[in-house]
Image (cartoon, rainbow, N blue to C red):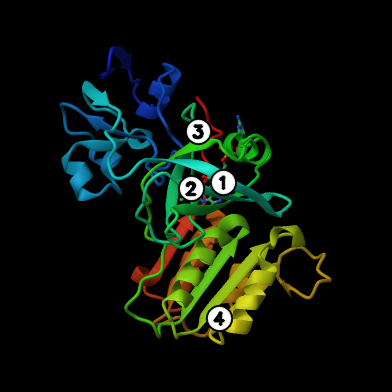
Amino acid sequence: MPHITLGETQITCPDGEVLLDSLLKAKLHIPYSCRQGLCQACMLRSLDVTPPAAAQIGLKDTLQRQNYFLACRCHPEQDMHIALPDQHGAAVTAVVINKQWLAADILRLIVQADSALSFYAGQFINLQRTDGLTRSYSIANLPAPDHTLEFHIRRLPQGQFSTWAHDELEVGDTLTLSHAQGSCHYLSGNPAQPLLLIGTGSGLAPLYGIINDALNQGHSGDIHLFHGSRDPDGLYLVDELHNLTATFANFHYTPCLSSADNNLGYRQGRAHDLALTNQKSLKGWRVYLCGHPEMVRESQRMAYLKGASLRDIYADAFVVGGGQMP
Ligand SMILES: Cc1cc2nc3c(=O)[nH]c(=O)nc-3n(C[C@H](O)[C@H](O)[C@H](O)COP(=O)(O)OP(=O)(O)OC[C@H]3O[C@@H](n4cnc5c(N)ncnc54)[C@H](O)[C@@H]3O)c2cc1C
C-alpha cells in the first residue's frame, strides 16, 4: 500500500481507493468538487515521482510536466510526496456585491474580484468558501472593467454550497476564485457560422454569457437558443432573452417545458429533443450544450449524428459530485 506524505502528515492509500478519498478520510483539507476530473479543484503536485498518467488527463501540458495531478483520478502506484498546488494561474479574492433571485431556485450572484481575472464568458470558475468547500460555477457575463462576475446558482435540496449561497452568503462576504477553465465559450473568427445552444436549468448561465459575447462581437450567423425546464419556474431571464430577439434579427429563443402542465405558450418537450429532432443537418454549425449531464451526453450524440463536427461541439455537463463524502 503506497505511503503518501503531505507536509507533516503521512497516510496510506489502499488499493482501489482514489487518493482524494484517502486524504479526506484523514481529515486533510483538500478542495474538491466534481470528483470526475472535470473541475480540477482537487489538483495537487507530486514533489518526487511522476504521477500516474490517468491522474493527469485533462491537465495542460505545462502542468503535467510540473507533476501536477488530480487527486480524484489518482490511484497511487508508489510512495509519493505531495503538496497543495502553488497558485497556478490567477486565484483571487472576490467580494459578494449583489444577490438576486432570477427564479425561485436560481440565484444570480454578482461578485467583484480584487484584481483582473482573465476569462471568456461561458467558462467556469471554482468558487471556494473560507472553510475550503469548493464548487464549480459558469460565468454568465462578459469581462467587465470593474472585475465583476455573474453566476447563476441553482439550489439543490441539501446541496452544501448551493443552499449556503442561497441562504447564508451575504453581500460583503468574500470567496476565493480559481482561474477560469473550460472551452465552452464564444470563438471569434467565424462570424457567419450558425450557432445552436441548448441548456437546462442553470445551464443557461454559460449560454447567456456566450450569446451576449457573440452578439457583442457582431456575430452575423443565426444563433438559436433552446432553454429547457420541467416547470415554468425553471425558465428564467425570459423577458431579457425575448428583448434580445427584438434587437437582433439573427437571435432566436425557444423556451421549452418538459412537463405536461404547459398553458403558457412555451414549446412542449425536452429542449434537446425540440432543438435536434427536426434539425435536418448541423454540418458547419457550432453547438453548445450545458446543464444536466444526461442531456449533455444525449445531445452530443444527436448533434454528431446530425452532422456537427466533434470539434464544433462544446459541452459543460454540470456534474454534481460533492455529496459523496467518504
Ligand atoms: C463545469 C461545471 C460547471 C457548473 N456550473 C454550474 C452553474 O453555472 N450553476 C449551477 O447551479 N451549478 C453548476 N455546476 C454544479 C455545481 O458545481 C455544484 O455541483 C452544484 O451547485 C451542487 O453543489 P452543492 O454543494 O450545492 O451540492 P452537494 O452538496 O455537492 O450535493 C449534491 C447533491 O447530492 C445530494 N447529496 C448530498 N449528500 C448526499 C448523500 N450523503 N447521499 C446522497 N445524496 C447526497 C444533495 O442533496 C444534492 O442534491 C457546475 C458543475 C460543473 C462540473
Q: Is residue 276 visible?
A: no
Looking at the image, tell me whether mark 4 or mark 3 is earlier in sequence order.
3
Residue picked out by circle 4: 251
Q: Are marks 1 and 2 in contact (CB under 8 Å)?
A: yes
* Label 4 – label 2 distance at C-alpha: 30 Å
Residue picked out by circle 2: 112
Q: Is residue 248 visible?
A: yes
Labelled disc at residue 260: none
- Bin the neighbour count of mark 3 within 10 Å (Cα to Cα): few under 14, some 14-19, many 20 and up: some
Callout in the foreground (3, 1): 1
Residue picked out by circle 3: 129
What's the amino acid at mark 2? Gln
What's the amino acid at mark 4? Phe
- Bin the neighbour count of mark 2 within 10 Å (Cα to Cα): few under 14, some 14-19, many 20 and up: many
Callout in the foreground (4, 3): 3
Q: Residue at x 50, y 75 (%)?
A: 196
Looking at the image, tell me whether mark 3 or mark 1 is earlier in sequence order.
1
* Label 1 – label 4 distance at C-alpha: 31 Å
What's the amino acid at mark 3? Arg
Which type of secondary structure does the marked residue at label 2 adopt? strand
Task: From this view, report whether residue 255 is shown above or below residue 132.
Answer: below
Q: In front: 109, or 124?
A: 109
Task: From the top left corner, tell me how far across and down residue 35 is, in percent.
Answer: 44, 38
Task: From the top left corner, tell me how far across and down residue 93 is, in percent.
Answer: 42, 39
Asked if residue 204 lies left or right of residue 81, the reply is: right
Looking at the image, tell me whether mark 2 or mark 3 is earlier in sequence order.
2
Looking at the image, tell me whether mark 1 or mark 4 is earlier in sequence order.
1
Callout in the foreground (4, 2): 2
Which type of secondary structure does the marked residue at label 3 adopt? loop
Looking at the image, tell me whether mark 1 or mark 2 is earlier in sequence order.
1
What's the amino acid at mark 1? Ile
